[in-house]
Amino acid sequence: MQHQLALPALRSDSPLGFLAALGTLEIVTHTLDAAARLSWNGPAQPANLHTTTPLTLPDLANHLHQQLPHFAAKKSGKKQKGEQKPVVEPEPLLLAPGLFDRERSPGAPNETLRMPPAAAHKELRRHATAERETGAPQARWFAALINQLHTEEKRGGHYTSITPFFSPAGQMTLRQNWLRAVEECHNHPQQLTAALTSWVRVEKYAGASLDYHSSLPAAAQSDGNGVQHGVPGATWLALHAFAHYRLTGNGQRPRTTGWHRTTTFTWPIWHPPLTTTAITTLLEHPLIHDPRNPTHLANLGIMAVYTTRRTSLNSAAGPLATAHRTWPPATSEPQARQKSPHRTEAK
């Protein structure tokens, strides 16, 4: 028997909410309940988590908090003259440890997940062998974060591209972005509860370019300065959803599940409870991007399809825009809508 738990703040019409729901399922499946499933209440409605044992929202938030990587405690006292101790960072992705552990070679891009194609093929073979022999999950994550079938010219060389979900600002890397979300969740212990129930934004936290509302432009502020107020808890959960989106390519153009090139992201919502494996299969179905036959979509258990685009900030890529429902037509949606649980106040 499966028990159902509604996740009020993880709504189907928000790219960050949708990804955070998938990330929650990913974590729960691999740390608590292998039979966990996910469904949706409907368009612009919350996700439901289905588990074999009853869970409350506090139970779930507490379990998720226990999965946060831990930073080493800072020792007090004066340093000895000339003493230099390396900074030990925690493992950012506990579900697939070691994936980010690559030394950056001289002249290489700041993002260590970008590597020469030969190195990417070698690492993928190593991870695939480990998966066959021990069931290790790194190969699945590698294929979701690093595109060994497409390269980009960086610093005079050709390096693998990475997931289009991550749009770095400046020299920010995916590892740093992951750890920043973890750090903010430790600094604000209620963030994971808020991620599930009613979002609480944190000043000066930029998020991971998954939430258009995390950045207030300078023109909208009385002092003329832009403000960042992202949602660390929901962002940390959403980063775990990347495992559902495989990267491919033809050498000339990258491909990613759910994406048109690297600019438009499309996702469905469904009513039957699905496992992570079944969800990946559904996300890759070609009808998601060609919803001209409502009967076929309904037969797949799909209730709606949403899309968003990657915005631009000056000369760089910006966060994902607010969602647009492409099927069924948004005009058929009832006028009355529930109050959004996404609070805007900063803490």
Image: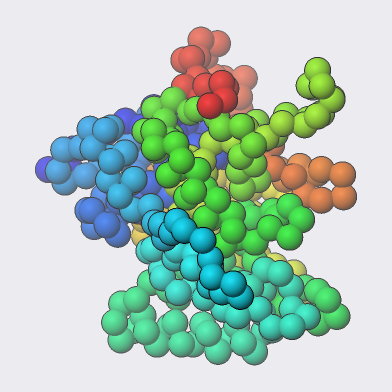
Residue at the top extreme of this rendering:
336
**Residue 114 vs residue 80, the one in the foreground:** 80
Left/right placement of residue 63 relative to residue 346 reads: left
**Which residue is pictured at 39% across the width and 63% down the height?**
94
Q: Quadrant of residue 57?
A: top left
Against 185, residue 282 (above or below) is below
Q: How many marks?
A: 0
Q: Quadrant of residue 209?
A: top right
**Residue 115 vs residue 14, the one in the foreground:** 115
Q: Quadrant of the N terminus?
A: top left
Q: How is the image coloured?
A: rainbow
**Which residue is pictured at 69% across the width and 42% down the height?**
319
Q: Quadrant of residue 271?
A: top left
Against 131, residue 328 (above or below) is above
**Which residue is pictured at 57% across the width and 25% down the height?**
346
- Whether residue 262 is visible, yes or no, is no
**Residue 235 vs residue 87, the one in the foreground:** 87
Image coordinates for residue 245, horizontal then vertical, percent: 52, 59
Image coordinates for residue 143, horizontal then vertical, percent: 53, 71
- Whether residue 174 is visible, yes or no, is yes
**Which residue is pictured at 39% across the width and 27% down the height?**
197
Image coordinates for residue 309, horizontal then vertical, percent: 71, 43
Image coordinates for residue 118, horizontal then vertical, percent: 64, 89
**Residue 270 vs residue 311, the one in the foreground:** 311
